[in-house]
């Protein structure tokens, strides 16, 4: 990696308020400092930090990413950070944040289907400027770390899939409230599993009962018990949203907080 990339790493991750330094460095790389980008945190199976600065395999990975994104290699910016290869991929002009997320998701899914040497990829949201690049990289690494902890979710982990839960984590009162919902159910056997299965099967009662191996009347009794404990309405969108988020927070280990 070039000295300019090292300089950029220092600015983005240690001096993100230095927008002037960021602008000059990006312009020296021949890129537009104002254009939004999505960070990719790539876990490389065969490469270690000491080897990546000169190894031809690094170029191969970056070239593969560029090819799947249909852009030039020089349009990408890559650095080594926290044991990951971080690549900032350009968003298309006029592209919304959600459209960028979907497009890059498709490109990286295609990359992972045929690429060797890549363990997993985390995707951040689009951001611009030094602070935006740093935030996107942190999001990508967070998504990668959580995806690896959960396991079984494939190799691509998007921050957009956990964005609501991550926003809630930043507010203690909201986090405490949502966690209390599952804590109130934890005292009775099978209620958490019943609720998880109910949502996994899109609130279809017959399918849920079959998945749990119980009689439909047993399922109805459990769901009624959940509603009584929480004062919830399992046919109301607001309650469904709250409880699905609470279950996701519990699944990421927040219950031990």
Image (cartoon, rainbow, N blue to C red):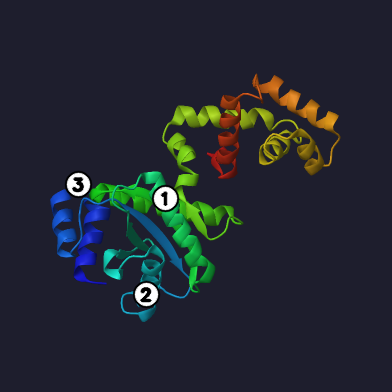
Q: Do the numbered discs 1 and 3 sit on residues whose CB atoms are within 8 Å?
A: no
Q: Is residue 207 left or right of residue 13?
A: right
Q: In the displayed structure, would residue 124 be above or below residue 191?
A: below
Task: Give the x, y percent position of residue 240.
Answer: 61, 29
Mark toward the viewer: 1 or 2: 1
In the picture as drawn, the residue positioned furthest to the front comes out as: 94
For image coordinates 38% across by 76% down, the residue present is 60
Image depth: mark 3 or mark 2 in front:
2
Please give the residue where the numbered disc 1 appears in the rendered image: 101
Image spot of residue 206 (x, y percent):
79, 36
C-alpha separation, residue under disc 1 versus residue under disc 2 = 24 Å
Spatial CA span between label 3 and label 2: 29 Å
Q: Is residue 57 above or below residue 103?
A: below
Q: Is residue 146 left or right of residue 69?
A: right
Q: Are marks 3 and 2 in contact (CB under 8 Å)?
A: no
| Count of numbered circles on the image | 3
- Residue 17 got which mark? 3
Q: Which mark is residue 58?
A: 2
SS category of the residue bearing label 1: helix
Q: Please identify the quarter of the rendering in which residue 231 is found.
A: top right
In depth, the one of 81 and 203 nearer the eye is: 203
Which residue occupies 32% across, 53% down? 92
Q: Does label 1 or label 2 sit earlier along the sequence?
A: 2
């Amino acid at each position: 990696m070039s000295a300019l990339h090292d300089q950029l790493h220092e600015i983005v991750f240690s001096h993100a308020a230095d927008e002037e330094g960021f602008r000059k460095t990006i312009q020296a790389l021949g890129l537009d400092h104002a254009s939004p980008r999505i960070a990719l945190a790539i876990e490389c199976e065969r490469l270690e930090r000491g080897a990546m600065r000169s190894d031809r395999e690094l170029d191969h990975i970056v070239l593969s990413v560029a090819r799947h994104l249909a852009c030039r290699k020089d349009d990408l910016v890559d650095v080594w950070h926290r044991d990951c290869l971080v690549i900032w991929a350009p968003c298309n002009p006029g592209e919304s944040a959600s459209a960028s997320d979907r497009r890059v998701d498709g490109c990286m899914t295609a990359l992972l289907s045929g690429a060797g040497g890549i363990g997993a990829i985390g995707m951040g949201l689009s951001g611009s400027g030094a602070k935006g690049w740093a935030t996107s990289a942190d999001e990508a690494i967070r998504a990668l770390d959580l995806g690896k902890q959960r396991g079984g979710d494939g190799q691509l982990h998007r921050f957009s899939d956990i964005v609501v839960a991550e926003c809630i984590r930043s507010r203690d009162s909201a986090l405490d409230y949502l966690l209390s919902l599952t804590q109130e159910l934890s005292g009775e056997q099978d209620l958490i599993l019943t609720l998880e299965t109910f949502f996994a099967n899109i609130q279809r009662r017959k399918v849920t009962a079959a998945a749990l191996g119980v009689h439909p009347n047993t399922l109805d009794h459990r769901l009624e018990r959940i509603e009584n404990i929480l004062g919830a309405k399992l046919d109301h969108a607001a309650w469904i949203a709250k409880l699905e988020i609470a279950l996701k927070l519990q699944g990421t280990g927040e219950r031990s907080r």
